Amino acid sequence: MEFKIETHLHTYEGSACASATGHEQALARKADGYDAIIVTDHFYRGNCRVDRNQSWEGFVRDFTAGYRNAKKTGDEIGLKVFFGWEECFGGSEMLVYGLDEEFLYAHPEMIKWSAREHYEQIHAAGGFVVQPHPYRERDYIEGITLYPYYCDACEVINTSNRPIENVRAKAYAEDFGLLMTGGSDIHHAKSLGGGMIFEHELNSIFDFIEGVKSGRGKIIGL
Ligand SMILES: [Zn+2]
Ligand SMILES: [Zn+2]
């Protein structure tokens, strides 16, 4: 079998730069032929749409709305929807997989964690950290910062990147012996076609993590 998953996806509800709601993303990605998506909205220090001037509980509730809306639609149309997020450390970002909303509610201090503390805390709680698009060059990125020791894997194909930025990312991952993932970084309903393909069904975010660790996933575009 072929099981296609989008590992890097944004919703309007959570990300200021996204135009498609969780509901719209679920419909569009199902139409693209995906079996699963992981919602990874920009978290507190990234390009988050959610009002930061409210209680932590309110922030987390609003931040996770895109995921909940995608999940509701996904359950109705037969698309698996998993939860994650993307935090920002200066010019670099980190995707987090394997932890849930309860972790966010319980850790309001996480917005002050350095990249190192972030990695250690996420790891201690059973999560998995992936550095996406490490070599992306954009006017909003002040400088490239690499954190090879504070992530578990590197996203080596990002469909929203320029080709050379992915070539560099793959060489970097190989140099440091990092596990590899691929994703679209999709912000809108229009198809981008990235992600990963597994030969077995993924029933949870933990199945995805195990699949990456065991090297069983094929990265689309690699
Ligand atoms: Zn964005
Ligand atoms: Zn992203």
Image (cartoon, grey):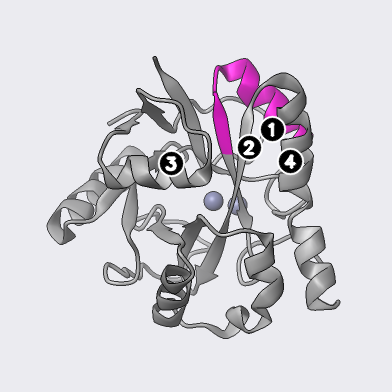
Mark 4 belongs to which amino acid? Ser
Mark 2 belongs to which amino acid? Val
- Residue 97, percent from left and from top: 50, 54
* Label 1 CB-ligand 2 distance < 8 A: no
Residue with the mark numbered 2: 81
Q: Disc 1 vs disc 4: Cβ atoms closer than 8 Å?
A: no
Residue with the mark numbered 4: 19
Mark 3 belongs to which amino acid? Phe
- Residue 30, percent from left and from top: 63, 21
Residue with the mark numbered 3: 208
Q: Which of marks 2 and 1 is nearer the N terminus?
A: 1
- Residue 195, percent from left and from top: 44, 33
Task: Tell me the mark number nearer the camera, choosing from 1 and 4.
Answer: 1
Q: Give the range drawn in magenta.
A: 21-37
Relative placement, left or right, of 182 versus 73 is left
Mark 1 belongs to which amino acid? Gln
* Label 3 CB-ligand 2 distance < 8 A: no
Task: Tell me the mark number nearer the camera, choosing from 1 and 3.
Answer: 3
